[in-house]
Amino acid sequence: MTTSLLKGQNAALSAGPVTFTVTATGLAADVSALLLGPDGKVRGDDDLVFYNHPKHDGVSISGQTVTADLDRLPTDVATIVVAASVDPLQPGAVFTSAPRLTITQSGTPAKTFTAPDFVARETVVVLAELYRRGDAWKVRAVGQGYASGLAGLATDYGVDIDDAGTDPATAPVPAQARSASPGAVVDLTKVERQAPGLLEPARQAGQALVRTGLAGRRAAVYLVLDHDWHMEELYESFAVQAFAERVLALSANFDDDGTVPVIFSSGREPFLEEIRLDNYRGRIGQLHTQVDWGWGNVADAMRRAVSHYQESGASDPAFVVIQVGDEPWDKAEVRSLLQNTAALGVFWLFVGFGRGKLAFYKNLNASTSATFNNVAFYDASKNPGAVPGERFYNGLVDAFATWMKA
């Protein structure tokens, strides 16, 4: 009996060895694995296991199969990433159909996973992550593609590529992303250097800014995340992490500091931290465990964002992206804050995804007597990761562009 996993879904593993076999169609692919510490980075360059370094600390590669012996993994390994990359001897080759992953472990039914097809010239795809949960291990189906090759992926996780011996044929793509508009270039040098895995979404975000006339404009991007109890599954399934990565990629086009303040909205005082180009891998998972579940206090989170923005002394407008999964219990306070911040240079974008009702946010500007020119709502569906990059970023920036031009 075989179980099929969906993108973002996870499953428990038992002790002992577990194998990950990759089957690619239409082109030759190499498999690799990265051993990561609790900070989401490799402990050293030897933690990249690939064709030139096929065995390390309980993880080995043979042909198209990665084997991880869960009983032999060091205690300071928190995550193992399983990836497939285009064979560097096939210059110009890219994934269109995602490789198929088969996960096997003695005494349990095999599990399979095939990610959705790719359309952005991906040359490497993270297929799965093994991660610790207490004293046990779980596996998550990821299916996230990148255009930066194995070298870019390894750099993203902290590997020194020269020391690791990675073939330069898989080096990251050039740092400047030329959009569909002739002559419009978005400089993404910092993204290429610090987070090559975000290079493609940053390019897509840049294209949306060019289309709306915002290319070259600056803004301070903030991210507010709903930490209501009903969001637990979406944190566990990597959906919130993937959403935060897309917002970080957008911010790289607005501000080159590579940092987005993140505020978790829960029942208690909002928890403020940050996600950066040099620490974004697994960052949301690390942070949200420090926050209690509760009924999301959106108004308090909004006040925290305004306070941080004013204390920073920023002269650029603030673009606050607020992920909401359900109706707020403090509706009157939210409306009051929207009215009071209209003259502060703050734009609020409520992004809905989750399983709750969102009528309040959808109807904020439905009344002809009480409209907010600095507010918009974007419905990102129950799974924003499934929304194509171009459509996702258009939804994020269209209303903000109108406000900026006004």
Image: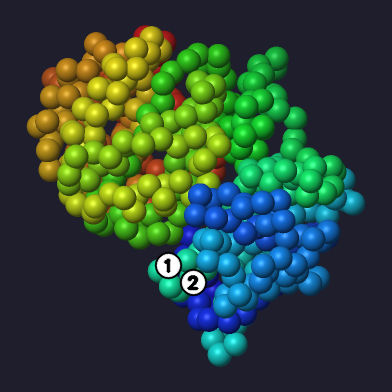
Q: Nearer the viewer, residue 229 or 392?
A: 229
Residue located 18% across and 34% down the image: 300
Contact between marks 1 and 2 (CB within 8 A): the answer is yes
- x and y, in percent, of residue 216 in the image: 55, 14
Asked if 197 appears above or below 208 in the picture, the reply is below
Residue 309 appears anywhere in the view: yes
Residue located 70% across and 14% down the image: 183
Q: Check the picture and name the quadrant holding the N terminus.
A: bottom right
Q: Nearer the viewer, residue 267 or 56?
A: 56
Name the residue type under label 2.
Trp
* In the image: residue 251, left or right of residue 191: left
Q: Residue furthest left?
A: 332
**Residue at the disc numbered 1:** 133
- x and y, in percent, of residue 178 in the image: 69, 24
Name the residue type under label 1.
Arg
**Residue at the disc numbered 2:** 137
Residue located 58% across and 67% down the image: 74
